[in-house]
Every structure is written in C-alpha cells, then in structure tokens.
Image: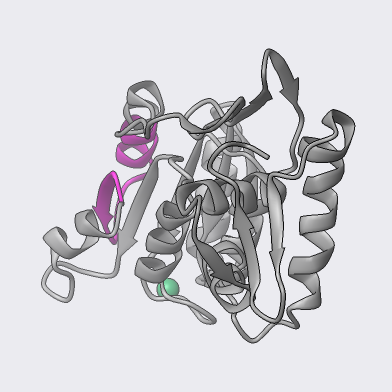
Amino acid sequence: MRVLIVEDEPLIARALKEGLEAEGYAVDHANRGDDGLWMATENSYDAIILDLMLPGMNGFVVCRTLREQGNTTPVMMLTAKDGDFDQAEGLDTGADDYVTKPFSLVVVTARLRALIRRGPAERPAVLKAGDLSLDPAERVCHRGAEEIELTPREFGLLRYLMHRRGESVSKRDLLSHVWSDDQLDDSVVQVYVGYLRRKIDEPYGRQAIETVRGHGYRLDPEGG
Ligand code: CA
C-alpha cells in the first residue's frame, strides 16, 4: 500500500510518515500543494493524506483538481481545527474523510485502513469512442480487445478528450484540466498528444485525435 502525505508542517509530516511506515505502508511526502498534486498525478497511490492549508495550492483545490482529472484515489483531508473548516465543503470537493488536528496516529491509521478498504467512492463510467475505451476506475485503456499502456499523464489527457469527445478542445483547456496549470507553454500538450497518437492511433492506422488548427484537438467520437 502506497500513501502520499501532503503536509507542510515538518513535525506532523514526520510523525505521519514514521507512523505509517511502521504500519507497513510505503510513504511519499510533499511539502507543497502543487507538488502534491503533481506527485498524485504522476504516481498511483492507495490513499492521499492531504492537509488543508498548504503553500503553493490549498488542499481543496488539490482535491478538486484530482477529481476533475478522474483521479478517484481516496483522500483524507487534515484540517487545522474545528470551526475554520466547513465539513460539507471538504466533502463537496471530493475528500472521502476528514480528520481534525491535533489527531492521534492511532485514529489516522485506523481511518486510513477503512478508507483504503472502502476504495474509491464513485466508480466513473467507462468512456467509449468507437472501439477505443477508457476505464477511469481501473485505469485501463483498450483499442478493441488490445490493452494499451498509458502513463498517468497520457491517461489524464485521453480521459479529458474522451470526456469531451466530438468537441474541439483548446490547448489552454487541456493545460488547465490535465496539467492544472494554464500558464505552461502549450507545446507540452502537443508533445503529449504525439505520445498518445503513437499509442492509440498510429499502430492501428487510425486518427482518433484530430488537430483543430490554431485551437487544439478534437477526439473523433467514432474512435478515428
Ligand atoms: Ca498546513
């Protein structure tokens, strides 16, 4: 079981990391919200422990962005103290559980076990475009019967294009929904679209991802 801790207070982060490692978890740690989001996007975790107040990007935004990307990893939100946090708001952004600081390690590990056992709360529907299919819950992609291996970023990109299949999607939109950073140079989108095409289109002589000149890309709802 691999867990990501996103927490900027060194003492709390260290206590959590050591406590969870003693329980047999593999633990990664990020100090900043934006770094945490990046790690959660690049790697696959069984659960994420996410502090609310973080430098770079707050926990609400991290969690909401993950959910928008189709990431259903269970999230436990840590909040500073009762009262400065609206539980309903936390749950609305897609957190699965919340724990108020100060907390005991015993409570956190017990609730983490329950969270992982329960798994992702909602299993999004399988997305289809012709014989191209993407299962966000299982994180697998198929062209016909053949499984295609995608990196998390490629998966996120294809998921978003499939979610909006038939529509012309701008590079800015892709940067903000797949990379969570619309300030990035949009050449990165071009590079990743190239990677995707080499996996889902070229080996099959297909053209599911169409270039919309001067704008972005469109996924053919028929799968190319
Ligand atoms: Ca904090």
Q: Please tell me whether residue 78 is drawn above or below residue 52 in the rendered image.
A: above
Query: In the picture provided, is 143 more to the left or to the right than 123?
Result: right
Quadrant of residue 60 within the rendered picture: bottom left
State which image quarter holds ligand 1. Answer: bottom left
Query: In the picture provided, is 73 more to the left or to the right than 14?
Result: left
Q: Identify which residue is drawn at 26% across, 45% down.
A: 97
- The percent coordinates of residue 142 (x first, y second) are 66, 24
Quadrant position of the C terminus in the picture = top right
- The percent coordinates of residue 45 (x first, y second) are 58, 39
- The percent coordinates of residue 8 (x first, y second) are 52, 71
Q: Please tell me whether residue 9 is drawn above or below residue 64 in the rendered image.
A: below
Q: Which residue range is magenta in the image? A: 95-112
Query: In the picture provided, is 164 more to the left or to the right than 209?
Result: left
| Residue situated furthest bottom in the rendering | 183
Quadrant position of the N terminus in the picture = top right
Q: Identify which residue is drawn at 65% across, 71% down.
A: 216
Residue 66 in magenta stretch: no
Foreground residue, 26 or 44? 44
Q: Identify which residue is drawn at 87% across, 43% down.
A: 198
Foreground residue, 91 or 184? 184
| Residue situated furthest top in the rendering | 145
Number of numbered discs visible in the structure rendering: 0
Residue 108 in magenta stretch: yes
Foreground residue, 219 or 80? 219
Let me know if residue 32 appears in the view: no
Foreground residue, 131 or 74? 131
Q: How is the rendered protein coloured?
A: one colour
Let me know if residue 201 appears in the view: yes
